[in-house]
Image (cartoon, rainbow, N blue to C red):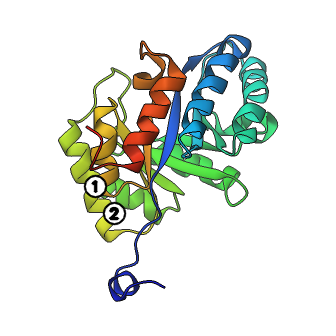
Amino acid sequence: MASRDDRINPRRPDPRLYLVSPKVADATAFADTLTAALAGAALEGAGVAAVLLRLEAPDERSLINIAKALAPLIQSAGAACLIAGHPDIVARAGADGAHLTGIDAFSAARAALQPERIAGCGGLTTRHDAMLAAEAGADYVLFGEPDQAGHRPSPEAVAERVAWWAEIFEPPCVGYAGTLAEVAALAAAGADFVAVGDCIFEDGRGPAAALADAAQRLALPEAVE
């Protein structure tokens, strides 16, 4: 039975991982890496809630083929398959939704995606932009991801934005962790999902070990340093 405090201030569900792929131009070359990463999280009992595929191909048909090859691997692991941009190929690729960067891109894609599919929004540099995305119906908002030049806010700024959102708003928020060390802080700040990307795929131990490490930090944010 929930405590009185929980009834007055309901707790959010435990945070989960949101895996961001590197740029993928060859589905066959990436499939084993992706499968290993997902298995690493599953071994820790956490699993991955969603995988964001960042696709790189010269034409739309190639983009669809890459996504169609990878989506079943993601979905069979119990995760949602999201595509970065390209909302027009989501249905044909068998994906579960798209992630859009910026209010304009989200607004243009929303009607084609919802309610059947997920429409998330990132690139939210101000609190006002985040509130606009939520008011427009974003299924989640993402804070702290790198921009096109690779720049991102400080870890402290991302945690502060996540804490602000978690305290006031109901739509889920994703906090982007640039390093494994940031995972615990974002979980403690109240993120519904913690996004991890390069810190997984560039880890010298391999993606399975790195994602297992991230899952441990997510489950025990105060105990894992």
Q: Of the residues under marks 1 and 2, which one precedes in the sequence?
A: 2
Local packing at callout 2 (Cα closer than 10 Å; few below 14, some 14-19, many 20+) is some
Discs 1, 2 touching: Cβ within 8 Å: yes
Q: Is residue 167 depicted above or below 49 in this figure?
A: below
Local packing at callout 1 (Cα closer than 10 Å; few below 14, some 14-19, many 20+) is many
Query: Which quadrant of the figure contains the C terminus?
Result: top left
- Please say whether residue 104 is visible from this viewpoint: yes
Q: Where residue 16 appears, x then y in whole percent?
A: 49, 49
Direction from residue 130 to residue 37 in the image, left or right: right
Q: Is residue 224 depicted above or below 173 in this figure?
A: above
Residue drawn where x is 37% and y is 41% of the image: 217
Residue drawn where x is 38% and y is 85% of the image: 3
Q: Quadrant of residue 131?
A: bottom left
Direction from residue 218 to residue 24 in the image, left or right: right
- Please say whether residue 123 is visible from this viewpoint: no
Count the labels in the image: 2
Query: Circle 1 — which element?
Result: helix
Label 2 sits on residue: 166
Direction from residue 45 to residue 127 in the image, left or right: left
Q: Quadrant of residue 204?
A: top left
Q: Where residue 8 appears, x then y in whole percent?
A: 35, 86
Q: Amino acid at mark 1?
A: Ala
Label 1 sits on residue: 189
Q: Quadrant of residue 162?
A: bottom left
Judge by depth and name the residue closer to the eye, 17 or 167: 17
Query: Circle 2 — which element?
Result: helix
Distance in Å between CA atoms under marks 1 and 2: 8 Å
Q: Where residue 207 appears, x then y in whole percent?
A: 52, 22
Q: Amino acid at mark 2?
A: Ala
Q: Where residue 199 appears, x then y in whole percent?
A: 39, 24
Residue drawn where x is 76% and y is 39% of the image: 76
